[in-house]
Amino acid sequence: MKKLTGVYLCAVFILAALVFVSCASGASLGGSKAVFNDDIQGKEWILLEFRSQGKTVSIDRKKLDAGFPNGVFTIHFEEDKVNGVGAPNRYFGPCTANSDKTLSIGNLASTMMLALFEPDELKEQEFFDYLSNVKRWNLKSGKLELYSVNSSGAETVLVFGPK
């Protein structure tokens, strides 16, 4: 029995080592590493505005940053993962970016902190819904644009700037 347990432990150790080497080598399931260059990946982006149905809503960053000192409405891409802060909850999930500028953000998970107040311009759940329905991206004049489609087919563009 001791010999059999030793074999299992050795197998688990080898498997763990293989997983570590694979992760350290930058292997990516979604392929985002090759698509999102250093202009996008590895940076924290903050929401500046969103456009929907011909209307542009600017985000009052001074007001938000005063109410949320740790940041609000941020996004960060790292290989095939996305994370950031809503208002006030942290979120994370998988993503896949492609060379044709399509982007898919998988099921997001988030913390469940109670917000003492929500921004007037955008509610946290709306922000999460927009992210979950992103279809494509563009980098324009140093700003990251994420194009989302709601259930009725209307497009909303989330515009982020570098933090």
Image: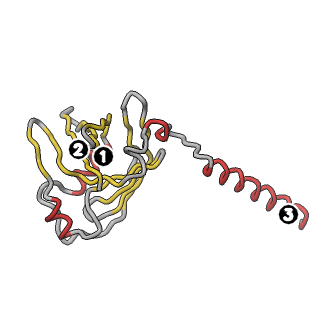
How far apart in space, not on screen, are marks 1 and 2 (Cα)? 9 Å
- Where, by quadrant of the figure, is residue 136 drawn? top left
Label 2 near label 1: C-beta < 8 Å? yes
Of callouts 1 and 3, the N-terminal one: 3
- Residue at 11% x, 36% y is 53
Of callouts 1 and 2, the N-terminal one: 1
Horizontal arrangement in the rendering, residue 126 relative to residue 26 (left or right): left
- Where, by quadrant of the figure, is residue 5 drawn? bottom right
- Residue at 31% x, 52% y is 45
Which residue carries the number 2 mark?
158
Q: Say what amino acid the circle numbered 3 marks.
A: Gly
Residue 93 place in picture, x, y as percent: 42, 51
How far apart in space, not on screen, are marks 1 and 3 (Cα)? 47 Å
Q: Say what amino acid the circle numbered 1 marks.
A: Leu
Any mark on residue 131, and which? 1
Local crowd size for mark 1, using a 10 Å CA cut-off: few (<14), some (14–19), many (≥20): many
Of callouts 2 and 3, the N-terminal one: 3
Horizontal arrangement in the rendering, residue 154 relative to residue 22 (left or right): left
